[in-house]
């Protein structure tokens, strides 16, 4: 089986804890290169040696992300840098003929969104944005439930918050694309896309900003053409918590862990049906990141005919609109 040569762009905590172990085990990709503009090569090599087998070919190390993105020997890239860098790096990778899996959000400016669209129209390349929650089986159940009540007067509520206390973390830096909207709120906009909900007729965005100008708390209220509503709250400055609910006219579902399900727990959805009875639905643990990577491989090998597509452009458009009009 031909393994696709993949480069890892960015070597922060998320890359070390999540992506490096997955790439070490994945049967479809071979880690060929890593770029980091902050971590020294000796530290990267130390982490690589912990996980990769001795028979693994040497991994090239780059001190500049752009050098990796331009390297013709690399077939695809996984972009895991700070939010502000995603758009330009995706554009550079696509222009150099590479398939791209980019951590969320893809981008959040109209300029970058339009540039990416134009490139994809002219090049036969795969672009995926990393909303890993989509690959958990509980979301199949959620989508099926929503399809049953989508013509009703439904309402969606969601909350996703965690405390990023380190001021050096890019999520706490405005100039690096930090903030609750881009880091957590983007999930809720992607859910609307996942459920095939059109863009709202009206919206309201309200923030609480830090002294550095970063939105540490963000509330999003969406009103759709038929009167249905969605309200989402996200924070990077409060105790860790997540929830998601959909209310129909005669039933509802409540999702305990919509985005991150602990490894030692089953996912739980409580459903109240039309008769008033509440039923609990449990779902086994799924490695969503591994599933996401395997889906990326299927899309590459089938020219987009096999697999779930989510290039993140709808999400980018929503983010751009929200940021521009508020």
Image: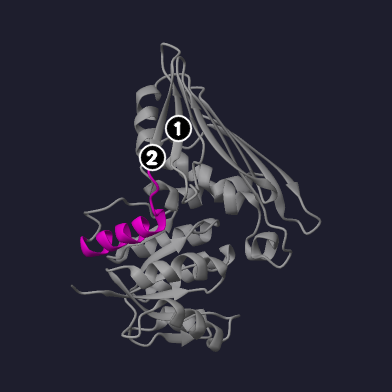
Residue range corresponding to the magenta coloring: 283-302
Element under label 1? strand
Q: Which residue is mark 2?
A: 283
Q: Is residue 150 left or right of residue 214?
A: left
Quadrant of the snapshot with the N terminus: bottom left
The Cα–Cα distance between marks 2 and 1, rounded to whole angstroms, is: 9 Å
- Residue 288, magenta (yes or no): yes
Mark 2 surroundings within 10 Å by alpha-carbon count, few (fewer than 14), some (14 through 19), many (20 or more): some
> Which of pointers 2 and 1 lies earlier in the amino acid sequence?
1
- Residue 301, magenta (yes or no): yes
Quadrant of the snapshot with the C terminus: top right
Q: Find residue 214 and report its horizontal and vertical position in percent.
A: 72, 55
Res 101 label: none
Mark 1 surroundings within 10 Å by alpha-carbon count, few (fewer than 14), some (14 through 19), many (20 or more): many
Q: Nearer the viewer, residue 220 or 29?
A: 29
Q: Find residue 213 and report its horizontal and vertical position in percent.
A: 76, 56
Q: Is residue 209 left or right of residue 201?
A: right
Residue drawn 50% across the image and 52% down it: 316
Give residue 179's quadrant in the image.
bottom right
Q: Main secondary structure of the magenta part?
A: helix
Res 269 label: 1
Colour pattern of the rendering: one colour
Q: Nearer the viewer, residue 311 or 244?
A: 244
**Could you tell me if residue 115 is visible in this image?**
no
Q: Find residue 314 and report its horizontal and vertical position in percent.
A: 44, 48
Label 2 close to label 1 by CB (< 8 Å): yes
When the figure is inspected, residue 22 is found, relative to residue 162, above or below; the finding is below
Q: Nearer the viewer, residue 197 or 289?
A: 289
């Amino acid at each position: 089986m031909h393994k696709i040569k993949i480069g890892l762009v960015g070597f922060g905590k998320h890359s070390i804890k999540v992506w490096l172990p997955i790439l070490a085990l994945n049967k479809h990709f071979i880690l060929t290169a890593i770029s980091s503009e902050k971590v020294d090569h000796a530290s990267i090599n130390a982490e690589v040696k912990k996980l990769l087998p001795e028979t693994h070919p040497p991994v090239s190390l780059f001190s500049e992300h752009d050098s990796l993105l331009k390297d013709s020997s690399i077939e695809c890239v996984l972009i895991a840098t700070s939010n502000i860098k995603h758009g330009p790096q995706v554009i550079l990778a696509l222009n150099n003929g590479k398939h791209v899996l980019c951590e969320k959000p893809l981008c959040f400016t109209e300029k970058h969104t339009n540039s990416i669209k134009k490139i994809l129209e002219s090049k036969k390349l795969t672009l995926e944005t990393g909303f890993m929650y989509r690959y958990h089986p509980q979301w199949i159940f959620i989508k099926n439930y929503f399809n049953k009540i989508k013509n009703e007067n439904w309402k969606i509520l969601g909350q996703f918050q965690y405390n990023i206390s380190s001021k050096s973390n890019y999520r706490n830096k405005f100039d690096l694309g930090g903030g609750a909207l881009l880091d957590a709120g983007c999930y809720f906009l992607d859910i609307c896309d996942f459920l095939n909900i059109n863009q709202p007729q009206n919206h309201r965005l309200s923030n609480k900003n830090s002294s550095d100008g970063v939105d540490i708390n963000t509330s999003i209220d969406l009103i759709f053409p038929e009167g249905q509503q969605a309200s989402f709250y996200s924070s990077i400055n409060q105790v860790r918590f997540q929830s998601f609910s959909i209310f129909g006219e005669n039933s509802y579902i409540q999702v305990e862990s919509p985005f991150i399900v602990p490894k030692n727990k089953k996912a739980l959805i409580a459903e109240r049906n039309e008769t008033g009875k509440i039923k609990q639905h449990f779902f086994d643990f799924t490695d969503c990141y591994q599933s996401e990577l395997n889906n990326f491989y299927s899309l590459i090998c089938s020219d987009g005919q096999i697999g779930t597509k989510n290039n993140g452009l709808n999400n980018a458009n929503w983010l751009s609109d929200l940021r521009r009009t508020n």
